Image (tube, rainbow, N blue to C red):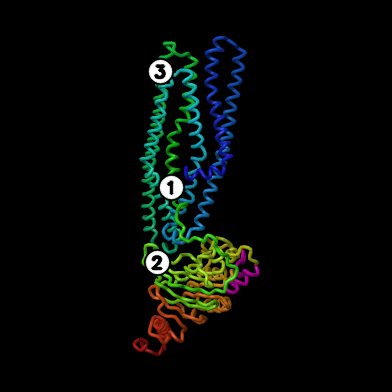
């Protein structure tokens, strides 16, 4: 209810129509037994044919009104539920878009997908017919009890025992089985995880001939979900028949007691028929209470899992009155910055660094030394645990996220493309970009000539994640996408690792032109990336251990000289003289 009430309030007009039509349908159903009672006990005894005909037409009218209201309420309930489901789905996606990367490092794609699709869809039943049947049953029960007391207080007292029994049974069952329903939905999320991860890494699976192991892993997750679902199935199997049995016993008791009261002339035959019709008005929708109890439990579990998205903390927040950057020079300053990922030790330790506007900087260091973390703090993918990061001497936390990131262009090591055309992928950051600008960016990234060889050129649709392109082609498209932004700060996170040396050389030349008067940070383990930089920063275990130009650092004992010597030794090893023996080559 806490999840749905805000959405119900938004569509209160539809909610009002739903209740009114259900109310009118209930009134129609309640009126029919009372009129039948009057016809049997009064009109038939008095043989008033005229009134019998009149009330017969009234019965027909009430039946038609009940039919019409049921049709209208079904349409209204479907429209009402679909609007709410649409809004919840939209809100969930919006929240996911604004979540920071820390959230995605702790949540799996499968669980997020299960919550975003399966859990939301499962709320539809409670919004369509479960609420309508419950409201109808409650109103019919209240109306029927009032009518029954008017007809026979004694007979009504026996009927009042049934609702508390049903309420206690459904409530206790819901309380004891809530964890079971939640667990089944969680296991479905794990099953989603197994499928999503397998499909994303299908090339790796085939490369290692690991199909059988993956099938076994998926089978285990499938079994877990199956057994969790079967536990909930037992609840479904038990609850509905028990409720139907309780209602059937109550009807049997009413027939027995009613028959006895007729024999002692405590009630009339018309009273008895009317009483039984009223009890059936409650019993027929009441038979669905078991299903409604199940739906309530499932919907409650779905709401709990959706609230895990709605209530997940967002750590990257904007200031109360954030500044919108209209123009920056690109100066970057790290002041005593320390940072560690959740559940890990600190990755960066008291980093102090100033990068003047327009300077080109290369970041070197072993894997895990903190290079990518250092650049991920600039666009506020994460915030430092201690210290601050400034752009043009202003703390990045004072800027709005959208304007901050609009001036930062990042080419990641993993080239990700959407299932769109090449044109749309390049123009992803600027949807209204002209074709001329897109082509210029593609040329700068050395991908234009390849695109023109395709049958549909820039309108060619790439496969999921750009699977129809090679690794180098995908990387050059992402470089073009970044260059189109024309940012003041350029970041290349090992972005030429997937291209051949000749293409790399062309891209490096293009990037040299593109980075003119732009602050540029390059992470790379290739010596060619050092050719155009003004400064080299070497990191080790989250600390800056060397900082300077090539000519200076190569003379110092340290990581940089070891790095260059290792590269030189590789080149020397490859530059063999065929006349040398193996021992001489060594």
The residue that label 2 is drawn on is: 340
Residue extending furthest toward the front? 321
Q: Within the image, what quadrant is residue 573 found in?
A: bottom left
Q: What residue lies at 50% left-to-right and 28% top-to-bottom?
A: 140
Disc 2 and disc 1: Cα gap in Å?
30 Å
Q: Is residue 413 visible in this depiction of the protein? A: no
Secondary element under disc 3, as helix, strand or loop, is helix
Q: Is residue 373 visible in this depiction of the protein? A: yes
The residue that label 1 is drawn on is: 304
Q: Within the image, what quadrant is residue 202 found in?
A: bottom left
For label 2, the crowd category at 10 Å Cα-Cα, with few meaning under 14, some 14 to 19 and many 20 or more, is some
Secondary element under disc 1, as helix, strand or loop, is helix
Give coordinates of residue 421: x percent, y percent.
59, 63
Q: What residue lies at 53% left-to-right and 68% top-to-bottom?
A: 474
Quarter containing the C terminus: bottom left
Q: What residue lies at 39% left-to-right and 28% top-to-bottom?
A: 246
Q: Which residues are magenta?
A: 435-460
Q: Nearer the viewer, residue 259 or 380?
A: 380
Q: Nearer the viewer, residue 215 or 531?
A: 531
Give coordinates of residue 5: x percent, y percent.
50, 43
Secondary element under disc 2, as helix, strand or loop, is strand
Which numbered disc covers residue 211? none
- Who comes first in sequence, dot 3 or dot 2? 3
């Amino acid at each position: 209810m806490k999840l749905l009430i805000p959405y119900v309030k938004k569509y209160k007009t539809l909610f009002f129509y739903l209740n009114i039509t259900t109310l009118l349908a209930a009134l129609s159903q309640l009126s029919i037994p009372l009129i039948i009672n009057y016809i049997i006990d009064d009109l038939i005894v008095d043989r008033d044919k005229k009134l019998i005909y009149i009330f017969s037409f009234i019965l027909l009218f009430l039946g038609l009104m009940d039919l019409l209201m049921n049709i209208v309420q079904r349409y209204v309930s479907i429209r009402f539920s679909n609007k709410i489901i649409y809004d919840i789905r939209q809100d969930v996606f919006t929240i996911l878009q604004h979540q920071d990367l820390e959230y995605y490092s702790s949540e799996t794609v499968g669980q997020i997908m299960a919550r975003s699709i399966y859990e939301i869809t499962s709320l539809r039943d409670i919004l369509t017919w479960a609420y309508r049947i419950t409201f109808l049953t409650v109103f019919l029960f209240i109306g029927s009890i009032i009518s029954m007391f008017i007809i026979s207080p004694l007979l009504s007292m026996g009927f009042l025992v049934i609702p508390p029994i049903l309420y206690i049974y459904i409530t206790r069952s819901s309380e004891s089985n809530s964890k079971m329903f939640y667990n089944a939905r969680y296991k479905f999320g794990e099953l989603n995880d197994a499928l999503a991860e397998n499909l994303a890494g299908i090339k790796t699976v085939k490369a290692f001939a690991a199909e059988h192991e993956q099938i076994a892993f998926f089978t285990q997750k499938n079994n877990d979900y199956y057994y969790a679902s079967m536990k909930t199935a037992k609840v479904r199997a038990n609850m509905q028949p028990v409720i139907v049995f309780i209602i059937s016993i109550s009807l049997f008791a009413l027939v027995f007691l009613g028959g006895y009261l007729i024999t002692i002339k405590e009630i009339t035959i018309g009273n008895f028929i009317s009483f039984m019709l009223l009890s059936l008005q409650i019993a027929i929708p009441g038979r669905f209470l078991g299903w409604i109890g199940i739906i309530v439990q499932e919907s409650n579990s779905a709401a709990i899992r959706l609230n895990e998205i709605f209530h997940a903390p967002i750590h990257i927040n904007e200031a109360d009155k954030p500044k919108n950057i209209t123009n920056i020079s690109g100066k970057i300053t790290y002041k005593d910055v320390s940072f560690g990922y959740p559940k890990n030790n600190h990755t960066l330790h008291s980093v102090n660094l100033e990068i003047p506007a327009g300077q080109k900087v290369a970041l070197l260091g072993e894997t895990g030394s903190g290079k990518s973390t250092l650049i991920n703090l600039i666009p506020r993918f994460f915030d430092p645990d201690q210290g601050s990061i400034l752009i043009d001497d202003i703390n990045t936390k004072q800027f709005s996220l959208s304007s901050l990131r609009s001036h930062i262009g990042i080419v990641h090591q993993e080239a990700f493309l959407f299932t769109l055309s090449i044109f749309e992928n390049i123009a992803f950051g600027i949807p209204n970009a002209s074709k001329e600008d897109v082509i210029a960016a593609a040329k700068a990234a050395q991908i234009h000539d390849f695109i023109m060889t395709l049958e549909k050129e820039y309108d060619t649709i790439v496969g999921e994640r750009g699977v129809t392109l090679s690794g180098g082609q995908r990387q050059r498209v992402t470089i073009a996408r970044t260059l189109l932004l024309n940012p003041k700060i350029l970041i290349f996170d090992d972005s030429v690792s997937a291209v051949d040396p000749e293409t790399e050389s062309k891209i490096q030349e293009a990037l040299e032109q593109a980075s003119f008067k732009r602050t540029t940070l390059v992470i790379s383990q290739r010596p060619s990336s050092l050719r155009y930089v003004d400064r080299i920063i070497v990191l080790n275990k989250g600390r800056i251990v060397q900082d300077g130009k090539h000519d200076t650092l190569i003379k110092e004992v340290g990581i940089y000289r070891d790095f260059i010597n290792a590269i030189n030794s590789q080149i020397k090893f490859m530059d063999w003289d065929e006349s040398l023996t193996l021992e001489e080559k060594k």
